[in-house]
């Protein structure tokens, strides 16, 4: 499967995993090295001037920090934010689990990664972003209310996303994954299960 956009991942083992299942231009952030590597950040900026970039970091706190740093450097319309599910476990090459005990990109099932990236491949049809809006989040009670954070976290948990995603990051993710109707059904069913 050929992916038409460059993919940004954290480390070399993430790159090795993706190289084994697809054909794409993959750039590593060298973990937190991206914070001090102006040349690498400039390369990512240059790539973003040409086309969109797929950002695929781990679902832990470190991945969140790296994603946030890159998002400050790249225009929002140039980023495709993909989120791996938060799966407890340990990578095969490691003796102990990560600090948070969750798998990184390298530990996620190859079929799941292919499924996530297929819309950006030569065999997929990219979904149009923007069908779900901030106004929809408000109407569904996912923003602007006292219990909005709890409602978002319930949906994030159901989807296997990091619970610390900001409302804007969650919006971007669901815009990629769902039609407006599908997401409304998910949000409503999630709220009904509270009753």
Image (tube, grey):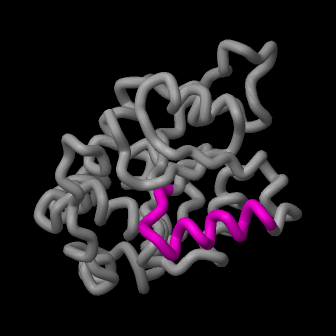
The extreme right residue here reads 36
Our reading of the magenta stretch's main secondary structure is: helix
Picture coordinates of residue 147, whole percent (x, y) = 45, 73
Q: Quadrant of the C terminus?
A: bottom left
Residue at screen point 47% across, 39% down: 85
Q: Quadrant of residue 177?
A: bottom left
Q: Quadrant of the N terminus?
A: top left
- Which one is nearer the viewer's eye here, 21 or 147? 21
Residue at screen point 41% across, 79% down: 143
In magenta stretch: residue 40 = yes
The extreme left residue here reads 181
Residue at screen point 74% across, 60% down: 40
Numbered marks: total? 0
Q: Is residue 171 left or right of residue 56?
A: left
Q: Is residue 158 left or right of residue 122?
A: right
Magenta residues, start to end: 39-54
Picture coordinates of residue 159, whole percent (x, y) = 37, 46
Q: Is residue 120 above or below residue 138?
A: above
In magenta stretch: residue 174 = no
Picture coordinates of residue 75, whole percent (x, y) = 52, 80
Q: Quadrant of residue 77?
A: bottom left
Residue at screen point 66% across, 13% down: 92
- Which one is nearer the viewer's eye here, 54 or 155? 54
Q: Is residue 163 above or below residue 85?
A: below
Q: Is residue 152 left or right of residue 103?
A: left
Q: Is residue 43 above or below residue 13?
A: below
Q: Is residue 157 left or right of residue 57?
A: left
Q: Is residue 40 above or below residue 95?
A: below
Picture coordinates of residue 107, whole percent (x, y) = 57, 25
């Amino acid at each position: 499967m050929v992916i038409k956009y460059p993919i940004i991942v954290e480390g070399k083992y993430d790159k090795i995993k993706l190289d084994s299942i697809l054909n794409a231009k993959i750039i590593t952030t060298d973990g937190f090295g991206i914070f001090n590597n102006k040349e690498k950040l400039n390369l990512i900026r240059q790539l973003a001037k040409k086309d969109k970039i797929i950002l695929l970091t781990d679902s832990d706190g470190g991945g969140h920090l790296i994603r946030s740093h890159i998002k400050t450097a790249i225009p929002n319309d140039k980023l495709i934010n993909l989120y791996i599910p938060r799966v407890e476990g340990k990578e095969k090459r490691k003796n102990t689990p990560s600090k948070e005990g969750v798998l990184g990109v390298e530990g996620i099932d190859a079929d799941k990664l292919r499924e996530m990236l297929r819309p950006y491949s030569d065999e997929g049809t990219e979904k149009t972003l923007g069908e779900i809006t901030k106004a929809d989040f408000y109407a569904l009670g996912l923003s602007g209310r006292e219990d909005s954070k709890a409602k978002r976290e319930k949906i994030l948990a159901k989807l296997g996303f990091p619970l610390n995603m900001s409302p804007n990051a969650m919006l971007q993710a669901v815009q990629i994954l769902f039609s407006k109707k599908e997401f409304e059904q998910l949000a409503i069913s999630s709220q009904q299960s509270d009753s």
